[in-house]
């Protein structure tokens, strides 16, 4: 997909953060606004050069970009899924996020604040974990920079990045003889960046798009304290029974491609990728392209505009794989039912099943509204009843997955 103009990105950003009724229920019930107002006031993270500042508006067309310096900068290269265009050529979206190493000057202050809020102020080991996970939210982003990668024997440039320090390039992949489900690894050239995986997926067959937070990973998105604790202090915990379910889906549906969708910012990519690699099938991770440099913005990412954001990302995947049949999996804490219902109404032949995990037992969650049967009926208006299902125990889904028809 071609990079957006600055005005288009600004418009999309405003749309993403329009508060829906579900957002309002979540945020008001747990007093998110009051909690965010008490957060540390951080220094400006956008402390890049005047040249980078001005030219970053040009995006990939910026002729004044620089390559990253491996001594001072670091880059995250995101795993992706390759698709075939109309003439059979393989393409993929290559996403890179650029940062300045160890540039977050408020780290100790924020670590102390988080540690106190979650009750770990005297735990030095916990503070070290919190500092490691917070660092990417505090480091300065790096616009107007690019990175080279080795791609099947060729040197390819990614970027330069735009205003948010992120580049997105839809590029052709050399070669044609790739098998469905084949995975290759690409490496950076002269850059402090990790290798990344490219998974090849043919145009037809089953596919899975899954929410992350409180669907496959305990995040407690209904609670600001819960979000901080599960994200920065605790070892990430899978939802009971979900790793086994996803393995069953992978085996039963002949290794379908997986996408993992979260309203978290790209700053959390290494943390979430490691979690996914530990418990779930490999796949492309879709995160918000807003590199928030403070905790209040991080909480807003997870709790505002999630419906519009997720519908937008579903539309993007549909453009790449319009002939695939998707299983979409989410939960009741955020706007997954509304987003998936809207996606089905737009593309009824594209979505073959919708599974929503009913989340219970979270103190800061208004379960009477979030799990109200009328909410689900409204969210899935116009969606056939045999397409969507609300579950509490993942075991409920095994028979449903087994009953899905084969796709030629």
Image (tube, rainbow, N blue to C red):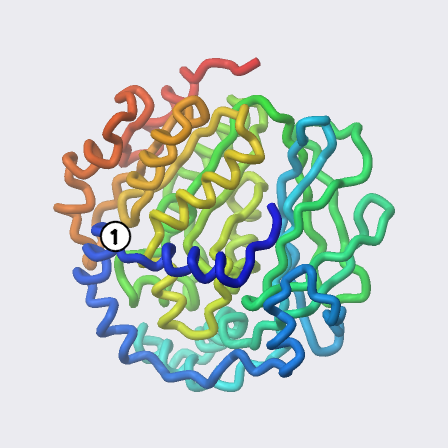
**Image vertical order of residue 271 relative to residue 196, above or below:** below
Q: Is residue 216 visible?
A: no
> Residue 397: x and y, percent?
36, 27
Q: Is residue 344 left or right of residue 368?
A: right
In the rendering, at what x and y percent does residue 4 appear?
A: 56, 55
Image point (16%, 35%), residue name: 373
State whether residue 269 is above or below residue 177. Answer: below
**299 or 168: which is nearer to us?**
168
Q: Position of residue 152 (x, y in %)?
A: 82, 44
At a point 57% along the width and 44% down the height, the residue shown is 284
In the figure, residue 168 lies in which quadrant? bottom right
Q: Is residue 198 visible?
A: yes
SS at mark 1 in the image: loop
At 21% from the left and 51% from the top, the residue drawn is: 21
Relative image position of residue 65 (x, y in whole percent): 73, 70
Q: For residue 189, which quarter of the picture?
A: bottom right
The residue indicated by pointer 1 is 20
């Amino acid at each position: 997909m071609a990079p957006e103009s600055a005005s288009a990105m600004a418009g999309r950003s405003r749309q993403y953060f329009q508060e829906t009724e579900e957002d309002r229920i979540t945020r008001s019930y747990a007093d998110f606004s009051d909690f965010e107002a008490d957060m540390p006031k951080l220094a400006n993270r956008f402390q890049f050069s005047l040249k980078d500042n001005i030219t970053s508006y040009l995006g990939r067309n910026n002729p004044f970009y620089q390559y990253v310096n491996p001594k001072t900068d670091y880059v995250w290269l995101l795993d992706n899924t390759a698709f075939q265009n109309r003439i059979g050529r393989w393409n993929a979206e290559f996403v890179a996020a650029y940062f300045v190493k160890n540039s977050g000057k408020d780290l100790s202050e924020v670590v102390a604040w988080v540690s106190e809020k979650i009750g770990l102020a005297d735990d030095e080991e916990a503070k070290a974990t919190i500092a490691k996970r917070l660092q990417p939210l505090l480091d300065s982003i790096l616009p107007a920079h690019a990175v080279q990668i080795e791609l099947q024997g060729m040197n390819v440039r990614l970027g330069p990045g735009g205003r948010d320090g992120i580049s997105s390039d839809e590029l052709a992949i050399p070669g044609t003889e790739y098998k469905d489900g084949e995975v290759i690894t690409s490496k950076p050239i002269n850059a402090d960046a990790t290798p990344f995986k490219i998974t090849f997926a043919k145009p037809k067959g089953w596919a899975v798009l899954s929410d992350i937070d409180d669907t496959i990973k305990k995040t407690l998105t209904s609670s600001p304290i819960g979000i901080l604790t599960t994200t920065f202090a605790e070892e990430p915990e899978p939802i009971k029974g979900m790793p086994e379910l996803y393995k069953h889906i992978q085996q039963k549906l002949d290794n379908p491609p997986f996408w993992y969708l979260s309203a978290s910012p790209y700053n959390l990519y290494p943390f979430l990728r490691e979690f996914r690699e530990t418990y779930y099938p490999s796949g492309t991770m879709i995160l918000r392209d807003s590199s928030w440099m403070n905790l209040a913005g991080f909480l807003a990412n997870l709790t505002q505009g999630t419906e519009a954001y997720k519908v937008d990302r579903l539309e993007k995947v549909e453009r790449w794989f319009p002939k695939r049949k998707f299983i979409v999996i989410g939960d009741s804490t955020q706007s997954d039912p509304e987003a998936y219902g809207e996606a089905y109404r737009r593309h009824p032949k594209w979505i073959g099943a919708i599974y929503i995990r009913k989340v219970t037992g979270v103190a800061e969650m208004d379960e009477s509204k979030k799990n109200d049967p009328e909410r689900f009926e409204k969210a899935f208006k116009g969606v056939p009843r045999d397409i969507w299902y609300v579950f509490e125990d993942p075991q409920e889904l095994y028979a449903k997955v087994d009953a899905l028809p084969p796709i030629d």
